[in-house]
Image (spheres, rainbow, N blue to C red):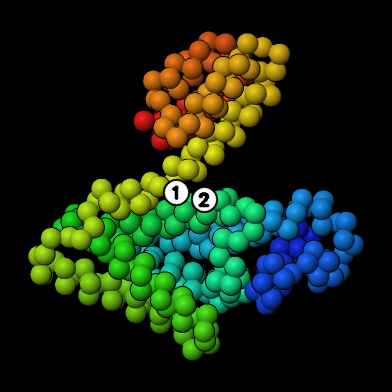
Amino acid sequence: MQKKKKQILEAAVRLFARQGFHATSIQEIVDEVGIAKGSIYFYFKSKDELLVSIFEYYGEQLYNATAEHPGEGGLAARQRLCLQLERQFRFMKEHAEFIQMMIKEPLSGVHQEQLRTLAFRFRSRYLNWLYRQIQAIYGSEAKRYWADGVLLLGGMMHQFMEGIMIDREAIDDVRLSGFLVRRLDDVMRGMLEAGEPPIMGHSGIRRMIAFGLAEQEEEHAHAVLNELKELAKGTDAEETIALIKAELNKAAPHRVIVRALLALLEKQGEPNWRETLRRLAQILEKSRTD
């Protein structure tokens, strides 16, 4: 990210956390950064677009804390989870103003629907990450309780994250991460010993995970279709692309129609479209086109 753009994002987060999104003016943001008012519009068309960019940037940073770092691949799954939780809690402390902003201004502004989509997308990716960790740690023996473990660990993490916002110095990242993994062990062991039927089955948690990820795939499909539209200017394929986009915009796109249109587009396409068409086909195969 460009240095100046990042400075604007960080300044806006400080002000939104302190006085709220609606109470903060563009002039106050540029004054905080120390730039001319017109300069901000080179990076963001409006204050609402700036808010969306903040959620995208910081949300991605928080999710990246769950990524496996070099040298961690050979560690036990339980130890990897501890390290990844530790990074997330450290992020929360270092970027407390972003979390405070989210609490103060949840899904506000004219881009409310776009923010809602982002929130669901990050939640889906996060649940999927938790699901993979629990699978790796507890294996097939605890398979019927994987979903319940995801929700219980997620709930514990959420409450401690709120605690960090209240008093970030009182909670030690390393100690908390180990504590949560040990409590997860207690929970999973307790469910196995009790032998009760699970509350949330695999189909339920998979629907929760798929909800936001499917929306993300649809966004990717439209982005690739826009690439193809540029390539297809002045050809019959332009109309085919418009028909695909129209079908995908329906509440319940029809898989057969989308596949037929994609097959037609492949016939109409030029050799230099091949890679872009391949990406589109892969995305559509995974998207909600039932």
In primary-sequence order, the first of circles 1 and 2 is 2
Viewer-side residue, 227 vs 214: 214
Which residue is denoted by mark 2 in the rendering? 117
Residue drawn at (29%, 76%), measured in percent from left and top?
182
Left/right placement of residue 72 relative to residue 90 reads: left
- Kindly indicate the quadrant of the structure image that contains residue 222: top right
Residue type, label 1: Gly
Image spot of residue 16 (x, y percent): 68, 70
Viewer-side residue, 23 vs 70: 23
Residue drawn at (31%, 62%), measured in percent from left and top?
150
Image spot of residue 132 (x, y percent): 34, 55
Q: Do the CB atoms of the residues marked 1 and 2 lie less than 8 Å apart?
A: yes
Which residue is denoted by mark 1 in the rendering? 212
Q: Secondary structure at mark 1?
A: helix
Viewer-side residue, 4 vs 133: 4
Image spot of residue 123 (x, y percent): 44, 57
288, above or below 123, in the image = above
Residue type, label 2: Thr
* Number of disc labels: 2
Residue 275 seen in render: no
Residue drawn at (45%, 35%), measured in percent from left and top?
251
- Kindly indicate the quadrant of the structure image that contains residue 81: bottom left
Image spot of residue 236 (x, y percent): 63, 11
Residue drawn at (30%, 68%), measured in percent from left and top?
152
Q: Secondary structure at mark 2?
A: helix
- Mark 2 nearby-residue class (10 Å; few <14, some 14–19, many ≥20): some
